[in-house]
Amino acid sequence: MLKKIILSVIGLALILTSLEAGTSKRKGTAGAEELRIPVGSRGVALGGGVVAEANGVDALFWNPAGASFTNKSAEAMFSHVTWIADIKVNYLSAIANFGGVGVFGVSLKSLDFGEIPITTVDEPEGTGEKFSPTFLTAAVSYSRRMTDRIYVGANLKLITERILRESATGFAVDIGLQYRLESGLRFGAVMKNVGGNMKFDGPDLEWGVVIPGSEPGSPVRSLRVPLQEFELPAAFELGFAYNLKLGESSLTLAGSFQNNNFTLDEYKGGLEYSFKNMLFLRVGYSYVNETDYVFNSPSFGVGFNIPLGGTLEASVEYTYRKVKFFDNNQFLTIRFAM
């Protein structure tokens, strides 16, 4: 019965996303694009195609269902990258494993734009003042192992954006599924960033105007300019992975297809080599059928697991990804587990 429900949900999602599929004409018309910025060195190194492979605390962004695929009681992760145009992205997340009850998690993503000079019509060279936008995404997560093969999970996100005194707030959900076989074959599906529209509002949108045709000396009226609502960059992703044991080593192949409602479809994939679960070498590629797409590029990564005694361990991961037109991305991730 559970399998039939899961297959029905996937089928419905495929129909809905095909009806709302993005095209090049819709590119750039979504808001809250920070939701699409990837976090975590491992997933990026594998081209982002880890919807079926992501596990533990690393899975909260890629597919929350994978958070319950862990034998640790708790995990925490910090990730940093200098994104395009010198935008810095910081991500902090943690999960706690309560056994049969499930795995609970929290995460916070923030964007640092640096200081931007304030300019006006009267002072186009700048007033001498500066501001920095605040973009935050906070999430609470839940994941559970339903059977020996089926894992499900969800994120509930609070999205806040603030520019000077104008702000917008919204909510979104991610719903994910993973199906893992003992043979090492895995399948995954996730719907991401599904939520209502957002709209900026604030006191700087008020203008003092004199209504045309008014009598001389009429008072100045306050007029607030309403802004257009914007939709979230929802997506649906299907993926597979296969883990092959090679003695003390293992080889993992992962790939996925992502349908977006505001841009073209994406194809992602990667390969990971693990030696004694301590050294990891990774390579990946993401592709969109568009000549000037910024992230049609390869990625390369390395990771190290470091035992700290008892059940405590740490990992340090680094990923380098080539980017068109901007400086290349360098991801650094530190994870602790116990």
Image (cartoon, grey):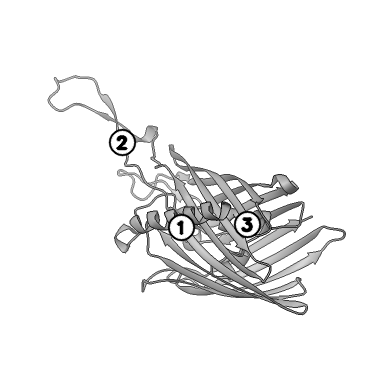
In depth, the one of 37 and 210 nearer the eye is 37
The percent coordinates of residue 139 (x first, y second) are 58, 45
The percent coordinates of residue 20 (x first, y second) are 35, 55
For marks 3 and 2 on the same chain, the one whose residue lies earlier in the sequence: 3
Estimate the spatial distance between the alpha carbons at disc 3 and disc 2, rounded to whole Å: 47 Å
Question: Which label belongs to residue 120?
Answer: none
Q: Is residue 106 toward the left or the right of residue 14 in the image?
A: right
Q: Give the amino acid type for the residue marked by disc 3 in the picture.
A: Ile
Q: Give the amino acid type for the residue marked by disc 2 in the picture.
A: Pro
Q: Do the residues labelled 2 and 1 touch (CB within 8 Å)?
A: no
Q: Give the amino acid type for the residue marked by disc 1 in the picture.
A: Phe
Q: Mark 3 points at which residue?
A: 150
Q: In this view, does 138 lie above or below 83?
A: above
Quarter-of-image position of residue 120:
top left
For marks 3 and 1 on the same chain, the one whose residue lies earlier in the sequence: 3
Q: Name the residue under label 2.
A: 226
Residue occupying image coordinates x 38% and y 56%: 15
Question: Which label belongs to residue 236?
Answer: 1
Q: Is residue 277 toward the left or the right of residue 31 in the image?
A: right
